[in-house]
Amino acid sequence: MRKNNIFKTLIIVLALAWSLIVLFPTFQLSQQQDKAETYYSEIESRTTLAGNEIRAALAAGNLELAVRDNFDQAGGGTVGDVVATVNKLIDLDEKIVKNEPQSIKLGLDLQGGTYLVYEVDLPKLLESLSKERDDTFEASIAKVRAQVRDEGLDFFDALQTVYQEDGIRLNRYFGKRSDSDADIVASLKSEAEDAVERTLEVLRNRIDEFGVSEPSITKQGARRIVIELAGIQDVERAKSIIGTTALLEFQLEMEPDVIGAMLSEVNRVMKRQQAGGSQDDLTEAGADSLPGEGKVRKDKEVSLEDLFGESSILEDRPGSEDDGSDSTVLLDEEVFQDRPFSALLADIGGDIGVPTKNVRTVERILNSPEVKDVLPNDAEFVFQNRATQIGEQEYYRLFVLKKEPELTGDKIANADVQIGSELQAGQSEVGMELTGEGAKIFSKVTGANVGKKLGIVLDGKVVSIPNIQERIPSGRARISGMANIEEAKDLAIVLRAGALPAPIEVIEERTVGPSLGQDSIRQGTYSALVGLAIVIVFMVIYYRLSGLVANVALILNLIIIMAVLAGFHATLTLPGVAGIILTIGMAVDANVLIFERIREELRHGKTVRAAIDSGYARAFKTILDANVTTLLTALVLYQFGTGPIRGFALTLSIGILASMFTAIVVTRVIFDYFTNRVALKQLSI
């Protein structure tokens, strides 16, 4: 007598029950998202807000206020009607947020979002590690960049090659004098690997703060990082938060007489260049002043070539990039002959201002070797991070700060968004809380420099430069000057997450719109259903009632695959859908082998029960071999593949394991159920 199948039946029932329970939140979420879309469309039709703006306001918690401010009477209805819809959407969004973590995650290609590939800028990392940076160093790094870009060489191989060709020892710029080139390269490689790992950790922290649901952040190769942000359409904001180096420094402004002397020196260098390099044409100048003080500035647009001719001071340095900047500048002609550099500047409220059109030219002048040679080593010119509108002209403030920072961002314990008071009332600010050590340093610096300006510099740009009114012992500071609350939030995020150990640059970026994602879902679903229908019809026609048994197992197989994806928070991608479609064919393949074996046994005259027993026994090894081989291939693809390949391998692996269970266990239990209760003389196969 055939043994009892109660245990197998119990496993099947439990598997089915678990699958349905796990998939229920996904089913709910699908319905809720469809309903939410109708609310979004209704709000969009009755206001001037775009879809992305509505979603952003909902996420920020101020959707009702945004709707009231942007209500469009032409859309029909009243403000109250739209607010009622807003309240429904808010309640529904809370349910969606609750169900999302328990549902099947859709990948970037299905949900829409942002795909970014970053590369750690190793040349910039080396610049920060070098003992000194001169023209030879800059030229060699430029050659290394070119070889890596044009010839595809490894960065450190190219570094060694360039330095050997130029006859330069690496210990001139790195390590100790006693270190060999091989030791230094090994040390630099270790620093680079550490920088990539720390960059990966910082980016994870930033993206977590950004609030992205289930982001994908993976390392690719030695120095690249792949970031997938499903559901994020604001790619520029994402890039801003991710790519900001976030090197925060507190630097004191230089004394006014030092600033005047530095301007005077730059003017002298430029006059020498105009005079063909003759020192005899120069006269000693006193402390300089800006052209706009006490009079109306009369700007005139002049060609750089007419103004400076072929002066070497305006040549691009090795490694610099041609940014297509204007070939003309605005200057005060009355000042130009005596003070050519000051003629490019203006006085704006006692600060140095540079017209937007002149910024690139001023940067080239200040970065030229001739000018850098005459400027003090402990001071630097730093631009403000954004332009100031004065009349019809935009100006960037230019400050002269001490090069050595008094305090850096690594002493920040926390940062959050605040609303300013007093003179900054209603404006967004970033409040910072310093660590114990940072608070002591800050107290000492502010106490010793009352009345001076302290520049808050982020990534080489002045964010704000407040006057020190008194000693600040509390360890708290504020950064004002934010354009809006979003900018303040983004700055607080990067300050909390910490600075990147090296700059990163975007190598590749893709944005998949939600409509394209929906099209992919529809097409993928359609393909899967068509494939499923063809297989079901074929099995019923060719294997009759036995084919119907195989179809039951096939449907259960699909349910288990989707349940595993939801239960283990795996991500379903478009290649993953392809893996499911392939699984549909592979799932019935096992049953085809079993059924053909059963047919063979029946032709040999065996009874139905004996034929079934023998068919399953003889087909098992073949099925196991085929599935194990495919599973090993899928695991290799998952281990060594990236992105789409991993998605395909994941669903294929789950499908193989599920098909083994359904094709061998489920179908056998069904056959045993009927053969135990009915004495079959003939099997419909």
Image (spheres, rainbow, N blue to C red):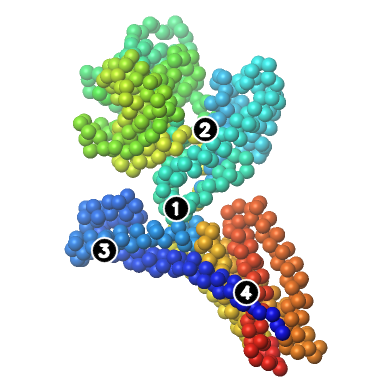
Q: Secondary structure at mark 3?
A: helix
Residue bearing the label numbered 2: 501
**The C terminus - image quarter:** bottom right
Q: Please report contact status of discs 3 and 1: CB closer than 8 Å, yes or no.
A: no
Q: Whole-percent x and y of residue 293?
A: 25, 18
Assign a secondary structure to mark 2.
loop
Pointer 4 residue: 7
Whole-number angstrom distance, CA of label 3 to CA of label 4: 52 Å
Counting residues from the N terminus, which is met first, the one under dot 1 or under dot 4?
Answer: 4
Indicate which label's residue lies in the foreground, 1 or 4: 4
Q: Earlier in the sequence, mark 3 or mark 4?
A: 4
Residue 357 location (% of width, % of height): 36, 31
Label 3: which residue?
A: 85
Q: Is residue 31 left or right of residue 647?
A: left
Quick check: 294 left or right of 121? left
| Residue pictured at 64% horizontal, 31% vertical | 189
Q: Residue at x 61, y 20 (%)?
A: 173
- Mark 4 element type: helix
Gap in Å between the C-alphas at discs 4 and 2? Answer: 58 Å
Quarter of the figure with residue 172: top right
In this view, which residue lies farthest toward the right?
A: 604
